[in-house]
Image (cartoon, rainbow, N blue to C red):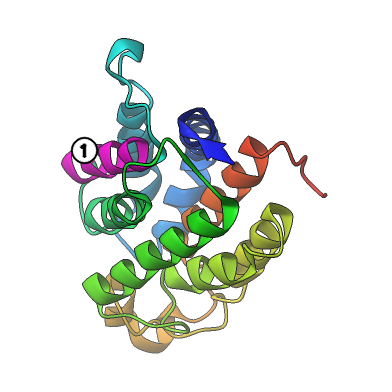
């Protein structure tokens, strides 16, 4: 069973991964976006883990709901609402239970991914964060390591795609040949999830 501590560990690992990869995310965002993806997410996830311990929520659903609100209020552009929606809807789907099963979490995260798709009006293959979120959540019932690998492969698979949503879509064919920064940062969430579950890189 997964308790609030597990989700605090997930978010802390995600914040560390975003901080570590912020420059790379911004570099990926430079040719096809606003060149601020890394710095925006770093600001947001820093806020997520800065919640004082005495105020930290104590259920999985509350942990993710609060994190989603913080991302919406601190991350600029489209990333804040999209990542905030992902975590808020996942948290809402988990309800108020003090612990949730891995199957319940996988189902809730799928609800979060579906909400992101609805908010952005995007689908798999549009060269967006969904290109790593969808394969990641599809593989989650198998294992955290499988989800991490599926999300990573999904991010890499955006390179030959032409963007059909977001700012990169304005570039048309010139968006081909670039790895989508949103898919890349989304893959970091699954990498952090595997780390929170105690699975070392490469497992």
Nearest the viewer among 53 and 60 is 60
Residue that appears at 65% across and 61% down: 147
Q: Is 73 drawn above or below residue 111 in the view shown?
A: above
Residue ID for mark 1: 74
What secondary structure is marked by label 1?
helix
Residue that appears at 49% across and 54% down: 105
124 falls in the magenta region: no
Q: Is 8 drawn above or below residue 54 in the view shown?
A: below
The spot of residue 192 in percent (x, y) is: 58, 42
Q: Is 189 drawn above or below residue 67 in the view shown?
A: below
- Give the residue furthest to the right: 203
Residue range in magenta is 61-74
- Give the residue furthest to the top: 54
The spot of residue 70 in percent (x, y) is: 24, 37
The spot of residue 184 in percent (x, y) is: 52, 58
Nearest the viewer among 13 and 43 is 13
70 falls in the magenta region: yes
Which quadrant of the structure image shows residue 39? top left
């Amino acid at each position: 069973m997964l308790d609030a501590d597990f989700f605090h560990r997930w978010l802390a690992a995600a914040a560390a991964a975003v901080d570590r990869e912020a420059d790379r995310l911004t570099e990926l965002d430079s040719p096809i976006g606003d060149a601020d993806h890394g710095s925006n997410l770093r600001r947001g996830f820093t806020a997520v883990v800065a919640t004082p311990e005495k105020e930290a929520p104590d259920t999985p659903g509350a942990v993710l709901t609060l994190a989603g609100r913080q991302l919406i209020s601190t991350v600029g552009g489209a990333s804040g609402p999209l990542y905030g929606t992902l975590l808020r809807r996942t948290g809402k789907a988990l309800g108020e239970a003090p612990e949730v099963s891995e199957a319940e979490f996988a189902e809730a995260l799928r609800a979060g991914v579906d909400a992101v798709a609805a908010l952005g009006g995007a689908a798999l293959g549009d060269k967006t964060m969904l290109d790593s979120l969808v394969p990641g959540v599809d593989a989650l019932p198998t294992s955290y390591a499988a989800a991490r690998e599926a999300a990573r492969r999904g991010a890499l698979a955006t390179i030959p795609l032409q963007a059909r949503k977001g700012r990169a879509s304005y570039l048309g064919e010139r968006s081909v040949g670039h790895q989508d920064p949103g898919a890349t940062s989304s893959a970091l969430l699954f990498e952090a999830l595997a780390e929170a579950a105690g699975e070392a890189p490469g497992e």
